[in-house]
Image: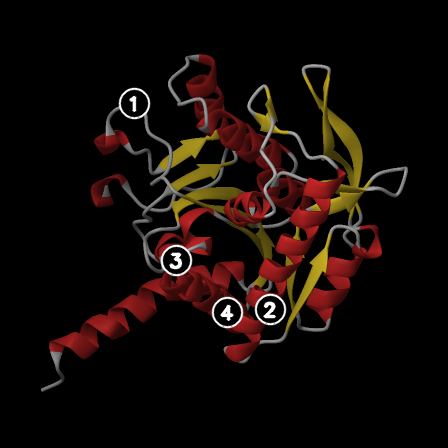
Amino acid sequence: MVNQKYLEKAEVLIEALPYIQRFNRKVIVVKYGGSAMVDEELKRNVIKDVVLLKLVGFKPIIVHGGGKEISRWVGKVGKEAKFVNGLRVTDKETMEIAEMVLGKVNKELVTLVESLGVKAIGISGKDGGLLKVNKKLSQGQDIGYVGEIKEVNPAILNELLEKDFLPIVCPVGLGDDFATYNINADDAACAIARAMKAEKLAFLTDIEGVYRDPEDTSSLISELFVNEAKALIENGNVGGGMIPKLQNCIDAIESGVNRVHILDGRIQHCLLLEIFTNKGIGTAILREGEGKYYNEENK
């Protein structure tokens, strides 16, 4: 008699099969940030998930942040953080620290992927003209070397994917003045997903997903169509911090990305659970007319 435990493992693999078939050779952009970047065990599990996606036929691209690590290093050199309208002011010295820290994070992720047997290449938005930016202002006020993406040149990413590399992108870009600008990692992931016509864009965050009521954690929404997401923003039903993320999701889908996932990166293997199981664990935002993941009876 076959052990029940092994039968359950087989069932899990069979459940994943239609998802593997559907998304084979498709581009998936993973925005990697939050606690999953700080906790070493979570970090390794996220990278294992992305490596598995690669090995079963996806074409993953990682876009990472590094805000917490940048703050730590800015503090180490004795600089005080300045904010305008809630946004960090990035002067020349802070930009140098940010680029140094992001480069360090980038190569640590490359090393992790390589240690799991997959070829990875870390690049920044400066390489190959990947991310070109305009200087970003906050309500008309200067916040230093912070960039707003105006153009994405996906040629280098297409080349790396074609050669079977896993690209890992650090969110800095060049302005018309060839100065280096820091870019919000969510914005960078969204712009890259649009330019690459990605099938999926996944945001790893420190929350479970989108709630119908931000005060009630039992009100997690498993799936949202774009019009429903817009209504949540218009009705004021989502918390302030979620609004730009949700707007990024809407923009990505309206630019051709099929599904956007908001996931809790603190949950081990959240990417695999959301992408390969009938009942995902985060919030999936879908374009109109897209089939839902699972039937009503599975909810």
Q: What residue type is labelled 2?
A: Val
Disc 2 target residue: 110
**Which label sits in the foreground, 3 or 2?**
3
The answer to whether residue 56 is left or right of residue 140 is left
Q: Which amino acid does label 3 sit on?
A: Asp
Disc 1 target residue: 213
Closer to the chain start, of discs 1 and 2, is 2
- The 10 Å Cα crowd at callout 1, few under 14, some 14 to 19, many 20 or more, is some
Disc 4 target residue: 51
Q: Which residue lies furthest to the left in this view?
A: 1
Foreground pick, 269 / 25: 269
**Which label sits in the foreground, 3 or 1?**
3
Foreground pick, 26 / 187: 187
Figure quadrant of residue 212: top left
Disc 3 target residue: 39
**Looking at the picture, how far across and down is residue 191, in whole percent?**
67, 41
**Looking at the picture, how far across and down is residue 3, in whole percent?**
12, 82
- The 10 Å Cα crowd at callout 3, few under 14, some 14 to 19, many 20 or more, is few
**Which label sits in the foreground, 1 or 2?**
2
